[in-house]
Image (cartoon, rainbow, N blue to C red):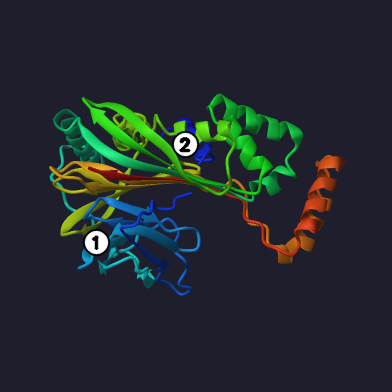
Amino acid sequence: MKTRILFTHLLIAAALCLCPIANAQTCRISGRVFFKDSLNRPAQNVTVYVPQNGSGTISDENGYFQLNLKSGAKGNSYTIEFSHIGYESTLKEINCKGSQPLDLGDIVLEEQLIMLPTAYVLPKRKSAADYILAQVRKKAIENKRDHPDYDATISYTGQTHQIPLVSQVLPGIAEGVIKMAGGMLGIGNCVKYAMDTDDLCGEVACERSVRGGKTRDYNARIVRSSTPLPPKVQKELTGVFRHLNLFSFLYSDDCLWGINYNYRYRFNHIGTYMWNGKCVDILQWRGKRGFLWASVHVVQDDWGILKVEAGYQDKKVLCEARDCGNGVYMPVSLVVTPNFFPVIEGSKSAQHIEFIQAQKKLPPGVKKKIISFLKDNSDKDIHPYIIGRVMVQYH
């Protein structure tokens, strides 16, 4: 993925937090996901997917998830799949009966068992990664030609956390540049609102109809927000993601694995693993300086991209897809997590203050503002972040 496109997505992610849509005929499913290791860490950004209806959600920064499924008097059965790049998928069978909430407790994901790379019969001087990406490109062109129509319901979500605290210590010129950039992207009111209030957390849902490869979104509405939003902010939230085409996100020429990958990027084929009875190839690439990196998971035989993880330093993009029929792998989730700022631990406020005082190049006014900010918030940890999420349910 080109840095320009990644940066654009990171800024767009500042606009919009996912809470599933509820109705009278639903059962609320919840739980918490962990990565199995010596610490049993809470698992963030795990895809929680329901194959029966193509819907799902993503776990939050503490591993918690919640989704609503239709229930019946006699009970409706579902399979819930928990998946994350680098870990074994876990399946849970549930039965929704009535409106009684169902707590699944702790879900633990184990590290993926990676096998040796598959031996391909390759043309001379062609690597396995080159061969696999060429097959993906060929299959993507066939899918776009044979399956140009679909309908979907999309939830666009975003959350900013403790961004106002950061804006208190930003130099005036830096804050101005951020607001100007938001204005150029059409989200200036959202950016200003996020910086002026405690947190901005909102979910927008809309219907998408694709005919002949052309996208039309309608019935865009704000499903939930952290606080009542001004009309201008509401308008930007409902329109900000209209031009995001997830199919192109996986297969377009602008992506790292697009048609131009061979000239600018070199992937390595590092291994395979089993997924739903099929082999999945893992391709990895990292820039010479190590800042830009990507991992692509490709389903053999179908040659569809199942998972993508890409990032620039600590800014991460995660995309997952599923076979929606006829071998067409369509994206079901997209997560953008740009962590621009490190966690500031309250217990280390004195060390932070000492460090700031020792910085000779900081203007006195800025230094005073930062130290005052650290003293005022010394009783708590500060974790500013921006998260953007997209979930798709195909019909």
* Amino acid found under the numbered disc labelled 2: His
**Type of amino acid at the residue the image marks with label 1:** Met
Give the SS element for disc 1.
loop
Q: Point out the tag, 1 or 2, that comes first from the N-terminus.
A: 2
Where does the N terminus fall, quadrant-wise?
top left
Query: Mark 2: which secondary structure?
Result: helix
Tell me where residue 215 sits by quadrant. top left
Closest to the camera, between mark 1 and mark 2, is 2
Q: In which image quadrant can residue 77 be found?
A: bottom left
Residue at the spot x=62%, y=51% of the render? 384
**Residue 155 percent coordinates (x, y):** 39, 44
Compared with residue 77, is residue 177 higher up or lower down, i.e. above or below? above
Q: Which residue is mark 2?
A: 9
Is residue 127 visible in the rendered image? The answer is no
| Mark carried by residue 115 | 1
Q: Quadrant of residue 223?
A: top left
Query: How far across and how far down the image is residue 20, in percent?
Result: 39, 53
Q: Is residue 281 visible?
A: yes
Location of residue 342 in the rendering, given as x and y in whole percent from the top left corner: 62, 53
Q: Nearer the viewer, residue 387 or 140?
A: 387
Q: Crowding near pointer 1: few (<14 within 10 Å), some, many (20+)?
A: few
x 38%, y 32%: residue? 264
